[in-house]
Amino acid sequence: MKNLRQMLLAASILVIATASQAQSVRANADVNVNPSAPGSPTVTVSPNVSASGSTDPYVQKRAADKVSKDEYKAEKRAAKTKMKEEKKAAKAELKSEKKESSQVRNEALATPSASTGASGSVTTGASAPAPVVPNATK
């Protein structure tokens, strides 16, 4: 029983050591390796690996979806910027039209015409007699 426990412990240590070495080789794959150096690991990349670095179709789809999402966001950002510029130009144009129409209106109100008096009612040369109101009896 004691021997079996020691053998399982040794086997598990070997598995962990092998796994950690495999991970370190995979991590060093991105590093520029000098192939002429003695004892250096040779790293080969399979030709069917996509830009994301995986042959898994789900990972490739996720990478393609990310690219298309980024393109969509860039187009949306450009359209929003263009819309803001157009809105700003339209607002400035409306403001200038409003200012111009206010100026025309104020000029028209500032110049008194011959047919209007100070109160704004139409007057004639002679004053008209006041209308006769019959007396109301109580």
Image: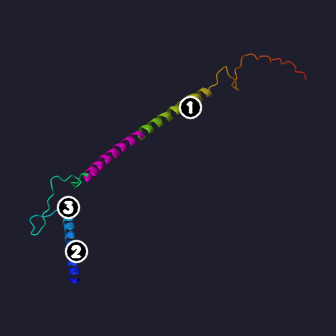
Residue at x-position 52% and y-position 31%: 100
Instruction: Specify the quadrant that holds the C terminus.
Output: top right
Between residues 92 and 83, which one lies in front from this camera angle?
Answer: 83
Q: Earlier in the sequence, mark 2 or mark 1?
A: 2
Q: Which amino acid does label 2 sit on?
A: Ser
Q: What residue type is labelled 3?
A: Asp
Residue 102, label in figure: 1
In the image, 94: left or right of 106? Answer: left
In the image, 114: left or right of 31? Answer: right
Residue 82, label in figure: none
Q: Does residue 34 lie above or below 108 as drawn?
A: below
Residue at x-position 33% and y-position 44%: 72
Q: Nearer the viewer, mark 2 or mark 3?
A: 2
Residue at the far right: name it. 138
Secondary structure at numbered mark 2 = helix
Between residues 4 and 117, which one lies in front from this camera angle?
Answer: 4
User: Which residues make up the magenta segment?
Assistant: 58-83
